[in-house]
Amino acid sequence: MRSLAQQLLEVADPSIVVPTCRNIAESVDLNAREKEDLAAEAESLSAQITSLASSLQHPDDEPDLYRSLAALWLELRFAWQRHNMVANYDTIGTGSCAPIVLARASTASFFLQRIEALLAREHLDKLGDTAVELLDSVRTDVDSGNLGVAA
Amino acid sequence: MSFVPSQFMSQIPSVDRSHADDQSFGVVQVDDAGVIKLYNRFESEMAGVAVSAAEGRNFFTHVAPCTNNRLMFGKFKDGVAKGELDTEFNYTFTYKMKPTNVQIRLYRHAPSATNWVLVGLRAA
């Protein structure tokens, strides 16, 4: 059976993820520079995940690797969420949004989806609930005036 | 002019699964908290979420987390609280899919107290 580190190396395989992200870039109206930026960002994220898998490849490291994967899922989820906010506030406010924002959102969620293959369903449900509750609790505090916004 | 045919709107709330599945746009019926009661085939295929994985879960927070903000979930909650909701706007989906431009119609049928999220594709 392949180790978690080996599976993660496959998830981050640049020969798979970079072309897919280039494909996402082609689905929106980006200029050549933006397409290259997006591919470079995908390549960089792939390298960072590869580095994580390489550094924690001993069987004894698996609990920490799994924990890091859960943290990475949250990172990507919140990154996607930020891009999604920009995209839709701009869409509703001005009628359109920068295509690069859409491409970044789809790219983040593409990595998210690949990482999910290595996490147990029950843990994904918990992470999803946690992501929602964490931000909703902040929103509730802000709405009720319990959290000051820096002047 | 709405992307939702007026004939379809006139059939709410008696839209059953078969009728919903016949539509060329997303039909999602939710309760007052946003929990999905009916999720049609078009929406399932567009979002890549199986009907069985969607029904019973909260549309705004879990099935379509891109809608968990003031722009959409906030409008929905306000409309439910007021007992009146019928608004249509452009939106963009990016969660686990290529960027997809859509039109959204949030509708509450007051006499039956049923809520509907209708989703149509739009050109960029």
Image (tube, coloured by chain):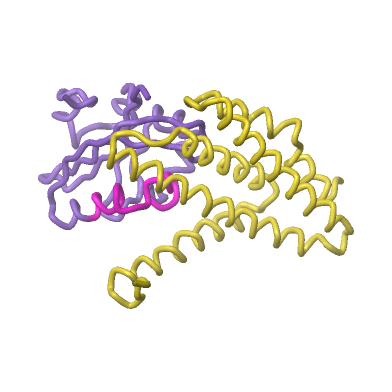
Chain colours: A yellow, B purple
Q: Would you say A25 lies left or right of A63 here?
A: left
Closer to the camera in the image, A100 or B64: A100
The residue drawn where x is 85% and y is 46% is A2
Q: Which residues are magenta?
A: B60-77
**How far across and down, in percent of the image, does residue A68 sit?**
70, 60
Reply above or below: B71 against A151.
Answer: above
**How far across and down, in percent of the image, does residue A137 sit?**
40, 69
**How far across and down, in percent of the image, does residue A64 sit?**
76, 64
Q: Quadrant of the C terminus of chain A?
A: bottom left
Where on the picture, by quarter, is residue A133?
bottom left
Secondary structure mostly seen in the magenta stretch: helix
Closer to the camera in the image, A132 or A17: A17
The residue drawn where x is 37% and y is 51% is B68
**How far across and down, in percent of the image, does residue A37 sit?**
61, 36
The residue drawn where x is 17% and y is 48% is B113
The residue drawn where x is 60% and y is 25% is A23
Q: Would you say A130 lies left or right of A92 here?
A: right
Outermost residue toward the bottom in this view = A146
Was residue B70 drawn as part of the magenta stretch in this picture? yes
Reply above or below: A115 against A131.
Answer: above
Was residue B109 drawn as part of the magenta stretch in this picture? no
